[in-house]
Each structure stands twice: as C-alpha cells, then as structure tokens.
Amino acid sequence: VATTTGKRNGVSSRAKVLTIDTMNPTVKKVEYAVRGPIVQRAVELERELSQGVKKPFAEVIKANIGDAHAMGQQPITFFRQVLALCSYPELLNDSTFPEDAKSRARRILQSCGGNSLGSYSASQGIESVRQDVARYIERRDGGVPCAPDNIYLTTGASDGIVTMLKLLVCGEGATRTGVMISIPQYPLYSAALAELGAVQVNYYLNEEKCWSLDISELQRSVDEARTHCNPRALCIINPGNPTGQVQSRQCIEDVIRFAAKERLFLMADEVYQDNVYADGCQFHSFKKVLFEMGPEYSSTVELASFHSTSKCYMGECGFRGGYMEIINMDNEVKAQLTKLVSVRLCPPVPGQALMDLVVNPPQPGEPSYDNFIKERTATLSVLAEKAKLTEQVLNTVEGIRCNPVQGAMYSFPRISIPEKAVKEANGQQPDMFYCMRLLEETGICLVPGSGFGQKDGTYHFRMTILPPTDKLKILLDKVKEFHHKFTQKYS
Amino acid sequence: VATTTGKRNGVSSRAKVLTIDTMNPTVKKVEYAVRGPIVQRAVELERELSQGVKKPFAEVIKANIGDAHAMGQQPITFFRQVLALCSYPELLNDSTFPEDAKSRARRILQSCGGNSLGSYSASQGIESVRQDVARYIERRDGGVPCAPDNIYLTTGASDGIVTMLKLLVCGEGATRTGVMISIPQYPLYSAALAELGAVQVNYYLNEEKCWSLDISELQRSVDEARTHCNPRALCIINPGNPTGQVQSRQCIEDVIRFAAKERLFLMADEVYQDNVYADGCQFHSFKKVLFEMGPEYSSTVELASFHSTSKCYMGECGFRGGYMEIINMDNEVKAQLTKLVSVRLCPPVPGQALMDLVVNPPQPGEPSYDNFIKERTATLSVLAEKAKLTEQVLNTVEGIRCNPVQGAMYSFPRISIPEKAVKEANGQQPDMFYCMRLLEETGICLVPGSGFGQKDGTYHFRMTILPPTDKLKILLDKVKEFHHKFTQKYS
C-alpha cells in the first residue's frame, strides 16, 4: 500500500497522499454555481481594476448572490444595538441605548452560560430563543400551536437543510433515497445530495405559468424516480429561489396532499417569507396550511420548515443564524437528530441572539418600535420597487423574457442565445459563455441558469434585485445593451 | 415501495416516512459523550432543583465540557469592545472606547462587504483576517513562512476537522480509508468517522508515561489496520484532549517521520496551544517542527493544523471561530476544498472578527495593551493553579490515579471500580454507572472515560479544570468522598 515515486530521499519524491484521484469522489461531484467560476473571475477583475488595469468598465457590479448588506442595505438599528450590548455588557450602563434594547440584551444574556455570548449553548439552541421562535410561528400561523422542543436553531438555513437530508439518506442501488427538488433549484440542494450520495429527483417548475408548481409534474417525477430509487422527501422553496415566484395556498395544499399520498417527507425552505412584493400574492407557511387541512394531514405528514436571519428585511447573512421546525417527526429519529447536532456543539451564539430579535422585534409602545417599523418598511418597499423595475426593464429587451418577481430576491429571465453562440461556447454551457462575456465586457456578475438547472435547450441567468436602485438601473441598461450586441454578433 | 399501515383515511394511519429503521444508518452509529446521557440528566436535575425538588446537593456543578465562560471566566475586554464596535459602528463616535479598539474595528469593517458583519465573507474567510492569521503563525513558528492562501477560516475547529476528514474518505471494503486517532480521543473524531463511514484506527496513548505517544504503538496500529483498510491519515491532539499531556519536540519529530514513512496525511489539532502549564513543557507546533526537519519533510508531508477561538485564554466557544492551515496540499484537491466550503457560504463573520483579534491582539504601546496582558496572564495563571490543584487532590484519593495536567483543560484520571460495581452496572459501561451515581448523589457532572475510549478493563472520567477555584475545591472534595463511599459500598 505504501508506495513512493521518484528517488527516495529527494525533495518532492513522494506522491501526495491526497490527490484528485484518491480524494472523496462524492466531493468531486459537488457543484455550487453561486460561488463558481464566474464569481472567481469577478474577484480577479476587481483586483485588476484596483491595480489600474484598463477594462471596458469602471467597477464590477455583483448581482450573483443574495448578500443584501454587501449591496449597501443597512442593518436594522435595534438589532445591532442589542448585539453590541450583548457583546460588551458594559454598555448596559450607557444611557444613549434605548431601554428596550437593554432589556432584550439582558434577557438574552441571562439565557447564556455565565451570561456570555462566548459560552456554548445547548446543541438545539438557547431555550428562551426557541420559545420566542415558537411564539413567532404561532403568531405568523394564526395560532397554530408550536412547541419550542420542535425548534432547532441552526447555522443559517443551509445547515438545517443539510442536517435533515443527512437523516433521510439510506439504502443502496434501486433502494437508495431519492430527494425531489425543483428545477430550477438553489444549488445547495444538488450539492448536498451529491455529497450525501442521494439521488437527485428533478421536478420542473412551469416557466409559462410564472414558475408555478404542477402536481402532474410532481407525479411524473416521482413515478419515474420509483423505477430506480426510493423517493422519500420533497423539497419546496417558497418564495422561490432562483425563480422569485410565490406559491398559492391552493398549490401548497395540493403539494401536502401529494406528499401524504406518495409518502414523502416535506422540506419547506421558507427563508424568504417576508419577501413578497406582487399584488395578490401572500406568503402561506406549509405548517399553517397543513394544520388547516385537519388531523388526517396535520397529525401525519412529516414536515421540516427552515428560516434564517440572512434574507427578508434584515439580510444578516454573516451571522449565520437560522432555525428549523420539525413536525410529526418520529421520537426516536428526533433523539438521533439531537445527538447528531450535538457533535458540532452549537450554532453560533451571536446568530442565535439575532434570530431571537428577528422573531421578537420591538413591540408597539416600546421606544424602538417606530424606528424599527420605519426601517423595515423602507427596506421592503425599496425591494418591491426593484423587483418591479427589474421585471419591467428586462422585458423591454428583445430575446429576454422575465416572469414577475413576486417574491424572494431574484429574477430568473429566459434568454435567447443564437445558434452561433452556442457553437462558439464550444462545450461550455451556452449561458455560462454568455455570462462570462457579459462579465468581461460590462463588469456585471450574474450566475448562468445552468448552475440552477433548467429545461434542456432553454437558457437563463439569475440576477439578484439587491444592488442600490441607481446601480440596478445601470446594470439593467448594460444587460440590455450587451444582449443586443451579443445577439447581433452571433446572428 | 409506498406502504401504509392501519386504515387508509384515519388519523395516525400512516407509518412515518422517517423512522429509526429507515434513517441514515451511519448517523445512528454516531456517539458524542461530551453531551451524552450524563449531561442530559444533569440538565434535568437542574430543572428539578429550580422547581424545589429536594436533592442531596444544592447545585449541579458541570465539569463535562470545556466551556470557560459558562464557568465564570471573563472575556477579554479588548475583544468584546471591538466586537461591539463592529456590531454597531455608531459606537465609533463614542469617546469612551480606546483608539486601538476603534482602529481594529475599522479595519475589520473595511474588509466586510458593505462594511457590515452582516455580509457573507469569501468562503475561505475574510482576506485580511487570513493575512493576520498567517503573520501570527509566522511569529509563533519563529519565522517559518505562512501563505494566507493556505488559511481557511472555519466554524470552530470541529468544522475544519470534519471538512478535512471528508476530503480524505474513499474506497470500499479493504481499501476504505482508515484514520488513526489516539485512544483516549476527543469524540468529535469518532463521531465524524462514523458519519463518514471511514474506518477508525485506534492507537493507544501510554498512560504510564503521562499519556505520551509511542511510535512503536503507532506502528502496531497502522500495521494491523493495513490488513483490513487503507490508513491514510493520522490525527494528533496536542496539548491533549481529554488527557492533558503536552508532547515533546522529539515526539512530534518522530510522528512526522512516521507519517512520511507510512504515507499518512497529518492532522494536528492544536486548539490548546496557549494552554501549557507544567514546568519544562512547551507547545511546539507540527508546522514548525516539520520545517525544522528540512525540505525532505517540509516540502512533502501533508499537514492540516487546526485552531479556534474557543479555548486558550479567550474561551469564546459561542462565537464558533476557527481556522485551519493546510501544508503541501495538492493544488487540485485544494480547489476542491475551496469549492466544498463555498456550499456553506462562509463561517460566521463575528467569529472571523474574533479570530482576527486573537491572532492580532493589542501591541506594546497601544492603549489596550497593558490591560490585555493583565487579563490574559490572570486567566492563564488561574488555569495553571487549577491544573495543579486537580492533579494534587485527585492523587490523594485511594483508587484514583491522575497524571499531571500539563496542558489543555482536562484531567483524565484512572479510577478503580470494584468488581461488584462492574456487575451492578449490568451491561452499562462501569464508568458510566460510576459517573451517573456521582451525579445523582453529589450533583457533579463528569464524562465517563468510555466516551473517549480507554484500554479494556481500565476506567476513567474526564473532568475539566474550569470551575472557579472555590467550586473546584468543593467538586474535588465531593469526588473524593464519593469515591470512598462508592468503593466501600461495592467492596
């Protein structure tokens, strides 16, 4: 087993222990387009610009990732005041901090070992935070009960999603666990399934009907999957990433009925639950709909729902806060889940504190209430404007067709790519070729649709609506101009 | 495949999708004693006490986990000031904060997207933080060069360790990756290996020689392992957890030579690098020793070293900060590593900021320097006293034998358990039985040695030295008294 290459005592004579050929093969299969080659090239271009290298643009504009603060969105003042108080409790004596921020900080610190954010929490998360999450869910869902014991705080939503998938994977060959995910999808799902060696089972969203979800397509997907794997879970992202749709209550009810009929564990990625912009659209949680369907469903269908501090109006990605709620999970499995998360000790405590503030913000009558509402409303209404603007401008471009951005933070327009450009791409995904040209010529960083999955022969890109309005306008104009030139060049 | 039990439309008629029999079998194999049944019982007892239930003790004293702040250790003022400034940058206008804290906060914020801790960082971590880590390592290792590009910031050390193990696992059956870990070990390792389905290859530390590492034992271990798996990595914890030993420079050199000869990827868990108490002991990093051995080793042996914000003098576990340095990693593998970590977006940014402060603390001449040194020295000297006290008191007990606590935060004394008690344990691990009795009778929460691994027929417990000195004295006296009574009862 122990072999060496080259001369025994010379420098570099040993072959490496860990090489591309001897590393974990499942890791090699992982792909994550949101931080893929386009973004790496964007970072290089930024460096070149800062070194004075001449480019056909003055700055790189990144619309590749839902990173609100990086795009200039301001944090909620109250949240940051409480975090500062928790970090450095001496500030509790500072009269410039509002009393409600102080009392919130005191309450969080009292729940921490030694009154310090620097202590490990319980692996499932701080108990008082889980209580606050449960009360938030009850309010959100019109009184449907929520037990703090069903709440697990997580390191962002991604952590919770991967943990749940991990529990679900078993079997080999034709009995290997299959997990149904939408196409287009957020590539965390495909990456996690590749790493876990689970079977990715695709169902396609209906682009013609504003990326809605057809039960007949779910049925086709699960029936086909049953010929070669054991589909056990169905993942839904609502509001949609990368597609920006908001599901109707009826659709959610149909999905739950389908999951019950086909015996699928439901995973509802609901991190954009406050990001709903379009008239007539409303967020409905899977939990609420499930409980409105009566005990036949509410006491049987297994559901995990995910939320995070990273999106909505707060956009606090860097803190890696999140939670999941599990419903109807088998008690023995739940004990295994608790054991599994304990190995990583606990989610970051500052992120837990932030999650607490998100689910328990200032209340009417408290000193910080008015300012909190002002800030939250301002952020959400700017996002709504930018969603509208993005759809409108993109739809003025011949060869680009953009569904309404009903929610979340993304548009996922379909783009026409001339046959000649497809050839020129030379094996590269044509929309990767397109986005790379766009980046090199305009400095705009988008993610090709192929990174999220799409129907064969169709091309898209994902673009966040997060750049500040003035930059977003420049970006949209540049995309328009580029698309025109690109189409001409290859026609 | 889709089966149901019971009547089709009735409540609870469906068997669960996810049950203990249909869940991921590797997850079931995971064990993590540091937060196992003893700790769960301790939490219950605390609840009972707070509800007024009578117990033979007034409080539960937890010495099960290296959670310094929970045991009353105070955070470093400078670190928390900078974190508060970063969380709420309005405070940069507050004249009560020292200038060096402010300039540090400004530097960190300038490295964050939108100058906010709420932005995602690069997946590998904030570049300026990685630069500071590299300079820290160079200073620590007497000038051995360190490239920021070889630094990956992590979510605590655990995250980095699991990620590295994940890269290393491949093969099936007799070619399955084996990973050598010390026995006793920190159970993160066994848990991660179980989850990844890698083969755990045990090598035993020499209790008679103060838990030192014998190369002959490594040789025995690897030779035996080669008959049934492919050992590819060797993990070392130095200073040791749970055993508290500090390795000599000679031993580290021997280990490196062994790894080179046997073609093993080295993983050095060095999170206790500042926790060295015993006279004549000194921390030597694997990196430094490797480079002092000349290019035959320094340019070939693959090494990953791990550090964290959770231990040493800062004890900031809750922030989940950490880094790993990788040396001689194949470039293609490194690209895969970078891709893999990008799926989880980034480590918590407040933890990255804290890691930056740990590697770049106040310098002589700066306003916070004197106080920083005072706080750090006080914490480390109290720990040194408690290490000594623990060893001394435990060694006064007949039937307990405790090696010197040279470093880290733990003692791992050997305990005699009478044959009658072993029988009474009735299949339970005898030291689990012992620790559970200790907890029920005295309120003291320790972790049985069986949770870390030990030579067959020997029994131990792991005890942190972290409780405040007055409580530690009470704890040690109670252990003494309990051990005496326990031995009498079962003799």
Image (cartoon, coloured by chain):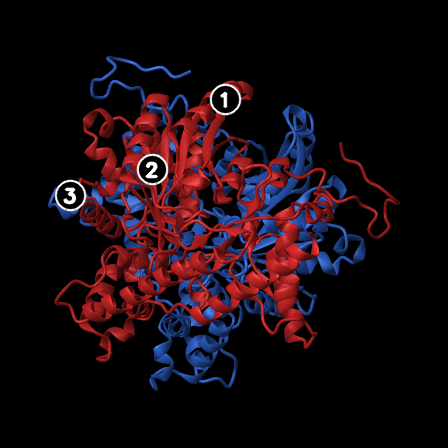
Chain colours: A blue, B red
SS at mark 2? strand
Q: Which mark is residue B304?
A: 2
Mark-to-mark CA distance, 2 and 1: 25 Å
**Label 1 crowd (10 A; few <14 / some 14-19 / many >=20):** few
Mark 2 — on which chain does it sit?
B
Q: Which mark is residue B143?
A: 3
Q: x, y percentage for residue A244? A: 49, 51
Q: Amino acid at mark 1?
A: Glu
Q: Up-down: is B262 above or below B128? A: above
Mark 3 — on which chain does it sit?
B
Reading the image, the residue beneath label 1 is: B224
Q: x, y percentage for residue A58? A: 18, 49
**Residue occupying image coordinates x 47% and y 57%:** B464
SS at mark 3? loop
Mark 1 — on which chain does it sit?
B
Of the numbered discs 2 and 1, the one sitting upstream in the chain is: 1
Of the numbered discs 2 and 3, the one sitting upstream in the chain is: 3
Q: Are marks 3 and 1 in contact (CB under 8 Å)?
A: no
Relative horizontal placement of residue B275, taking residue B224 as reference (left or right): left
